[in-house]
Amino acid sequence: MFVIELRFEPFADTTISLAEKAINQYLEALRANGQILGREFAVAYNDGEFKVRLMMPEKTSLAHRHNSPWVKATLSGLTEAKLLAPREKFIGQDINSEVSNTEPASWQLLYTSYVHMCSPLRSGDNLLPIPLYQIPATFNGDHKRIIKWQSEWQACDELQMAAATKAEFAALDEISSVDSDMFRRGWDIRGRIEYLTQIPTYYYLYRVGGQSLQSELYRPCPKCGSAEWKLDSPLLDMFQFRCEPCRIISNLSWDHQ
Ligand SMILES: [Zn+2]
């Protein structure tokens, strides 16, 4: 991932609140399209201009060709708020994050965790994140629905990893059960992506607990009940199960590895 600074300079009289509103809408639209990552953006006003530091999946994430209709509309909103088009200053590569996938993927998966900021769509060949703006818009012109699903999945993951509240169990159920809302929504998104990209796309189902290593190795697919989904060796060192018809991928229980 790459870090940049965006600068917004007024070209005529405006107010700070008008300018801030236009800038925030522009950032929200970029986020919904996967062009910038993260959730909170500190916009600072100093020396007659606004500055914000952003994380992007690729150096070219803000190129016009990636803009969604909403991003384009908010760019006009900047002009209406009397701000010049944003100027970009490259800061550097983020040393703590993963690089984006650049090779065509032979299969894909929807996979995230509470520590991952990058796209939840990953190449099945190398597990590298695929920037969402690289695929056709999934719903209503961009990828808002994926970003929202990802934020909620991560919130559940954080609650169950912390294991400090009663919400832990409900949260775990959301990310590990095929009867949950997170599964239903994520699995629909997966299907939409597969349809749009024509690349087989799987949903990652989290697995923890279980009686024993033996019982976990023979755990059937939770959706169709088939035992056929067990793989000879884990894919990407992580996924021991993959059900082709159900389009689900899963790990050997984290408690028995
Ligand atoms: Zn199945």
Image (cartoon, rainbow, N blue to C red):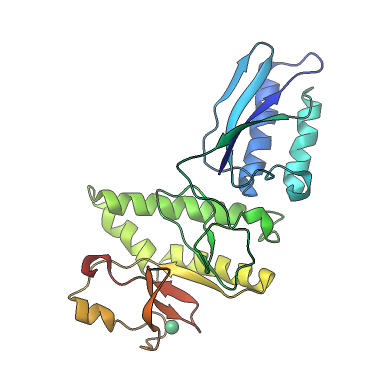
Q: Residue furthest left?
A: 211
Left or right of 247 on screen, residue 167:
left
Residue in view at x 62 percent, y 72 percent: 194
Left-right relation of 143 to 141: left
Up-down relation of residue 221 to residue 236 (above or below): below
**Residue visible at 70% across and 22% down in the picture:** 18
Q: Residue visible at 69% across and 12% down?
A: 48
Q: Is residue 252 visible to us here?
A: yes
Does residue 96 appear left or right of residue 210 in this picture?
Answer: right
Across and down, in percent, residue 26 comes to 68, 36
Residue furthest out toward the top: 47
19 relative to 47, above or below: below
User: Which percent across, then down, holds residue 42?
Assistant: 54, 27
Q: Position of residue 61 (x, y in %)?
A: 67, 45
- Quarter occupied by residue 13: top right
Instruction: Tell me, yes or no, if residue 167 can be seen here.
Output: no
- Return the residue nearer the eye: 174 or 126: 126
Residue 3 percent across, percent down from the top left: 58, 36
Vertical side of 133 occupied by 201: above or below: below
Judge left or right: residue 10 versus residue 1. right
**Among the 4 quarters of the image, the one containing residue 224:** bottom left
Q: Which image quarter has ligand 1?
A: bottom left
